[in-house]
Image (cartoon, rainbow, N blue to C red):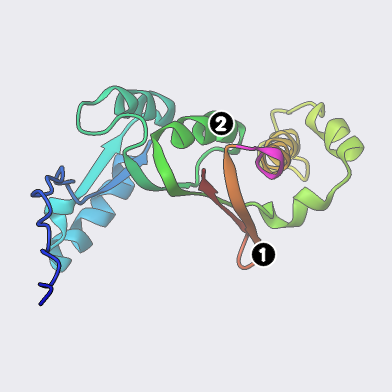
């Protein structure tokens, strides 16, 4: 009688154990203090790595760290100064593993992304006066920020390094994309 085929045992699979953590970046120590209270209450303090400082420098440092580096992060959520969005996106894309998610907040930017480029161009060149509380305070800065948000949305839509791009219009808008 023929015997049943012998089962081959698989060699033991060695996995690199990944440290589970959330890394937060902000320029404000004040926000870190607000969060720390809640992290302690939730018993999650050991999983939170909050870094205060310039986001570009922090992301560059993360790219160089032994336990992080390129392709090591599952999810990056960008919500920072809008003029720096493109640089943050590029760094986050390098940090994110294949199949990971990069999300960009404020993609609707209060509806300003619907303004025609010609209007944004004119407003971006508007002189900033000494009147910080006047009716035109912050107009040029808001226009420059809006141009950066729009430019990044256009870039992501054409970026062949990501797939399944989703533009959520809830709240102030979020772009979600998966790295190839």
Q: Is residue 16 above or below residue 57?
A: below
Residue receiving disc 2: 84
Q: What range of the chain is rendered magenta? A: 156-160
Q: Is residue 76 above or below residue 83?
A: below
Mark pair 2, 1: CA separation: 22 Å
The answer to whether residue 137 is seen in the rendering is no
Compare residues 19 and 87 and report the one nearer the observer.
19
* Residue 5 located left or right of residue 125: left
> Tag 2, which secondary structure?
helix
User: What is the total number of numbered labels drawn onto the structure image?
Assistant: 2
Quadrant housing the N terminus: bottom left
Q: Earlier in the sequence, mark 2 or mark 1?
A: 2
Please state the horizontal and vertical placement of residue 74, each as a whole percent of the image.
Answer: 36, 48
Residue 89 visible to the viewer = yes
Residue 16 vs residue 137, the one in the foreground: 16
Choose top left, top right, bottom left or bottom right for residue 133. top right
The residue at the point 62 percent across, 60 percent down is 172
Disc marking residue 156: none
Q: Is 139 a magenta residue?
A: no
């Amino acid at each position: 009688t023929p015997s049943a085929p012998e089962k081959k045992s698989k060699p033991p699979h060695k996995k690199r154990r990944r440290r589970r953590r959330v890394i937060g970046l902000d320029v404000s120590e004040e926000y870190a203090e607000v969060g720390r209270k809640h992290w302690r209450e939730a018993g999650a303090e050991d999983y939170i790595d909050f870094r205060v400082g310039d986001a570009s420098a922090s992301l560059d440092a993360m790219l160089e760290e032994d336990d992080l580096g390129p392709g090591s992060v599952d999810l990056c959520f960008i919500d920072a100064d809008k003029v720096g969005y493109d640089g943050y996106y590029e760094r986050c894309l390098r940090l994110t593993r294949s199949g990971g998610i990069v999300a960009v907040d404020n993609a609707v930017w209060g509806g300003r992304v619907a303004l025609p480029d010609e209007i944004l161009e004119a407003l971006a060149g508007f002189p900033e006066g000494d009147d910080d509380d006047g009716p035109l305070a912050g107009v040029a800065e808001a226009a420059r920020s809006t141009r950066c948000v729009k430019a990044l949305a256009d870039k992501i839509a054409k970026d062949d390094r990501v797939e399944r791009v989703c533009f959520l219009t809830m709240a102030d808008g979020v772009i979600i994309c998966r790295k190839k």
